[in-house]
Amino acid sequence: MNDDSLILGCLECGTKNRIPLSRMDESPKCGKCGALLSTDIISQPVDVVDNTFDKVVLGSVLPVLVDCWAPWCGPCKAVGPVLDELAVKYKGRLIIAKVNVDENPRIGSKYSISSIPTMLLVKKGKVIDQVVGALPKADLETQIARIL
Ligand SMILES: [Zn+2]
């Protein structure tokens, strides 16, 4: 499966549509009934890469928490399920994005990420802060509250 796309459920007919991130700004429509798909109902972390970061993260109307991680990082694995939970809890209010910094060096160097996991706090297209380390869920929510 290509990670470079999102599953969006249609609010009209319930069909799950796979939409490439590169087409996210073209008002995607449901393949079955033609209804416009809302990108505000994303309830799972979104995989973002160098080429889609600006559009998906900096172009988001919602605040974004970006988890910069790598497959070999133990603490990153530990925080993964917490982020899954938070993506559901904050559905419609926050997007949680994940960047594999091994495969996407541009983002790592742009934000001088030297230790992972690092969380970028993004509001209105700007990275307002970075938080280093695998925080417990309550502390992550404290950080999230700063950008909501
Ligand atoms: Zn539909």
Image (cartoon, grey):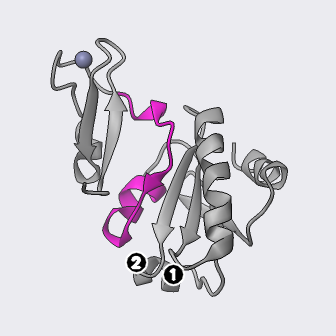
In percent of the image, x 52 and y 75: which residue is there? 70
In percent of the image, x 18 and y 15: which residue is there? 33
- Neighbours of disc 1 within 10 Å: few (<14), some (14-19), many (20+): many
Q: Which mark is residue 76?
A: none
Which residues are drawn in magenta? 38-58
Label 1 secondary element: helix
* In magenta segment, residue 90: no
Q: Quadrant of the C terminus?
A: top right
What number of labels is visible? 2
Q: Position of residue 88 (x, y in %)?
A: 59, 35
Examine the rendering and report whether any part of residue 117 can be seen.
no
Q: Can you say whether 43 is above or below 35 in the image?
A: below
Q: Which residue is mark 1?
A: 108
Ligand 1 location (quadrant)? top left
In percent of the image, x 31 and y 68: which residue is there? 51
30 to the left or right of 48: left
Q: Can you say whether 120 is above or below 91 in the image?
A: below
Cα–Cα gap, marks 2 and 1: 7 Å
Q: Quadrant of the N terminus?
A: bottom left
> Decide: marks 2, 1 in contact (CB < 8 A)?
yes
Label 2 secondary element: loop
| Residue type at the position of mark 1 | Gly
Q: Position of residue 120 (x, y in %)?
A: 62, 65
* In magenta segment, residue 51: yes
Q: Which residue is mark 2?
A: 104
